[in-house]
Amino acid sequence: MERRDFLKTVGLTAAGMFLRPKLSGVAFAAGRTRPKVYFTGNISAEGLLKMYGLVNRSLSGKIAVKLHPGEPHGPNIVPATWVRELLAIIPNATVVETNVFYGGPRHTTEGHRETLRINGWDFCPVDIMDADGGVNLPVPGGKWFKEIAMGKNLVHYDSMLVLTHFKGHPLGGFGGSMKNIAIGCASGPVGKKQLHQNGDAQWGHAGARFMEHMAESATAVAAHFGPKMAYINVMRNMSVDCDCMGTAAAPVTTPDIGILASTDILAVDQASVDLVYALPADQRKDLVGRIESREGLHQLSAMEKLGLGSRRYELIAID
């Protein structure tokens, strides 16, 4: 299916018609302002730069660019060459990450830096934010946590661009902008352990509670930066598995869709999910199966409950 035909099937025009979410059950009320989610079918460095230009107005000062660099030789990550071109137009920007809790190359700062070198992230500074420890950030309105341990260096930045490879996830069902900051900013030794454990210390649980844990962690990051955040989801090479699976990730069966950008974290993740569900059944079945088997849609309702953004949005095609 050509992207132009695909856009027609979901009710878009170049003027920016509304894509009515099939999942959230939220009716569009006439006259109400909805956050804008921009869409391009140009999945390239050029498309990425265009999307950044539409959502960067609030970013200033020292800018953290949060992305997932992948495990060694990971096949599905956002290409480092694209990010190189993006960083060239962002003054005072630094790529940021944290170490992982599970065993593997990125468990230690030394191993993480070697992985960065292998995957081509050696053209820019990369701040492993928890290399020297963590910092506890409060969770406004938290049900499960009052505070979450984040990488210590997070507080050294004024703004954050969340650059996300949208895909499936073994525990979360899908990984969008929310997962990128919720897990990706949490410190490896403490914060990620907090998020992945139930009260009974069970490791690796999925389901609704895990989605709520992630939403609360994302709330801590969002509360810290306030309005000085922007979000880009790259819907390309969408395996049902996260980039943390590296070369072991399941083969990609979902077609590439495009790049989305917004200043509303919930709107950009809701729109991404809606676009997956708008695909023909045979093209979406694997990714939708992963999302639903993990109760992944609860990410969206958990974010809404915490006031992280809006599930109502205006989807604007820019090409």
Image: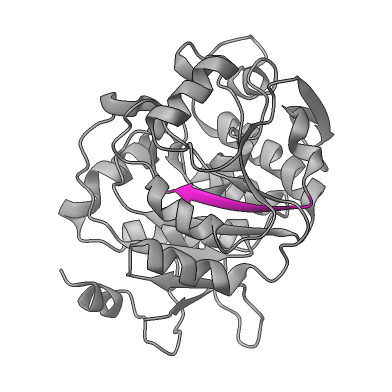
Is 310 displayed left or right of 21 in the figure?
Answer: right
Task: Give the answer, above or below, for where 44 lies relative to 97.
Answer: below
* Residue found 52% across the figure and 22% down from its top: 112
On the image, the x and y values in percent for residue 82 come to: 41, 55
Is 138 displayed left or right of 85 in the figure?
Answer: right
Q: In this orientation, which residue lies closer to the viewer: 215 or 73?
A: 73
Which quadrant of the structure image shows residue 258?
bottom left
**Quarter holding the C terminus?**
bottom left
The answer to whether residue 146 is visible is no
Magenta stretch, overall SS? strand
Specify start and end residues of the magenta stretch as a single range: 158-165
* Residue found 67% across the figure and 20% down from its top: 194
* Residue found 48% across the figure and 36% down from its top: 122
Magenta stretch encompasses residue 39 = no
Is 155 displayed left or right of 117 in the figure?
Answer: right
Magenta stretch encompasses residue 159 = yes
The answer to whether residue 11 is visible is yes
* Residue found 65% across the figure and 88% down from its top: 31
Task: Give the answer, above or below, for where 109 lies relative to 97.
Answer: above
